[in-house]
Amino acid sequence: MNKDNIIFRLEREDDHHSTELMIREAFWNVYRPGCSEHFVMHMLRNDPAFIKELDIVMEKGGELIGQNCFMKTIINADDGRVIPVLTMGPICITPSLQRQGYGKMLLDYSLEKASALGFGAVLFEGNIAFYSKCGFDYAGNFGIRYHDMPKDSDQSFFLCKELRKGCLDGVTGVYQTPAAYYVNDEDTERFDKAFPKKEKLKLPGQIF
Ligand SMILES: CC(C)(COP(=O)(O)OP(=O)(O)OC[C@H]1O[C@@H](n2cnc3c(N)ncnc32)[C@H](O)[C@@H]1OP(=O)(O)O)[C@@H](O)C(=O)NCCC(=O)NCCS
């Protein structure tokens, strides 16, 4: 991997379509036939919980090769407190450059930036195989549960990283996914029509 010509910067308005196109390419047929993440990104940007200072794109040689973004959300603590935290994503690397270390670089950069802005912890749904490389652990190990799931259910998809060490000490409770992540299939289909036609495939390993 040549790290010399990599830059990180904030997403600009004139990047929006290219970013969504890249997200669509990266997520297409990965978790379901087709994908909704490009539309999710489109909706998140207009949500008050979206953090514009953490709407990050990665370029290599002037080409967009990755993106990550963050939203404000909360943990409803068992003792009645409301703990502000971050959630993350969509995050992606353009398909032709995946598994070459760029995702880890992007994630390390984004988390450092979130930390510098004073945020305490990030919780979200992801694969521990990748995110553990950047210090994520199972959220259950911090005493945080995913919303709308039984206490003893398998929540190994639900991950957490403290940006400020100890900030979740003494906190147990339930994490809430920001409402803006929930898009419906009809709206996604309508939005997707503005993109080049792509075949939806049902593939092994998809989770939806
Ligand atoms: C997930 C994603 C952002 C990771 O970026 P990447 O550049 O491919 O990952 P890296 O090369 O930096 O990975 C670093 C290490 O994490 C682990 N890892 C990365 N992706 C993994 C995967 N899909 N499954 C298992 N381990 C993975 C590996 O150990 C990898 O090192 P290795 O390739 O030497 O084994 C990228 O693959 C992507 O865009 N995927 C499609 C969209 C997606 O799933 N986004 C995340 C949704 S939660």
Image (cartoon, helix red, strand yellow):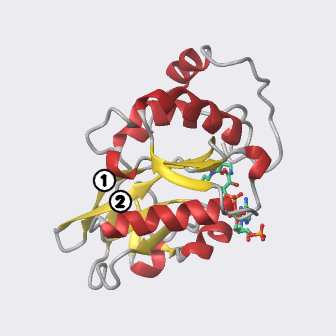
Would you say 55 lies left or right of 32 here?
left
Quadrant hosting residue 37: top right
Camera-side residue of 165 and 94: 94
Q: Say which element carries label 1.
A: strand
Residue 171 tag number? none
In this rendering, the answer to whether 7 lies above or below 31 is below
Quadrant hosting residue 3: bottom right
Q: Say which element carries label 2.
A: strand
Q: Position of residue 161 (x, y in %)?
A: 44, 73
Amino acid type assigned to the residue bearing label 2 in the image: Leu
Q: CA distance from mark 2 to mark 1?
A: 5 Å
Q: Position of residue 45 (x, y in %)?
A: 38, 36
Q: Position of residue 42 (x, y in %)?
A: 46, 30
Quadrant hosting residue 165: bottom left
Residue lying at 62% horizontally and 14% vertically, measured from the top left: 193
Residue lying at 25% horizontally and 40% vertically, measured from the top left: 48
Camera-side residue of 59 and 98: 59
Would you say 86 lies left or right of 132 here?
left
Using a 10 Å C-alpha cutoff, classify the residue at mark 1 as few (fewer than 14 neighbours), some (14 to 19) or many (20 or more): some
In this rendering, the answer to whether 129 lies above or below 33 is below
Would you say 37 lies left or right of 45 here?
right
Using a 10 Å C-alpha cutoff, classify the residue at mark 2 as few (fewer than 14 neighbours), some (14 to 19) or many (20 or more): many
Residue 86 tag number? 2
Residue 72 tag number? 1
Q: In the rendered image, which quarter contains the C terminus?
A: top right
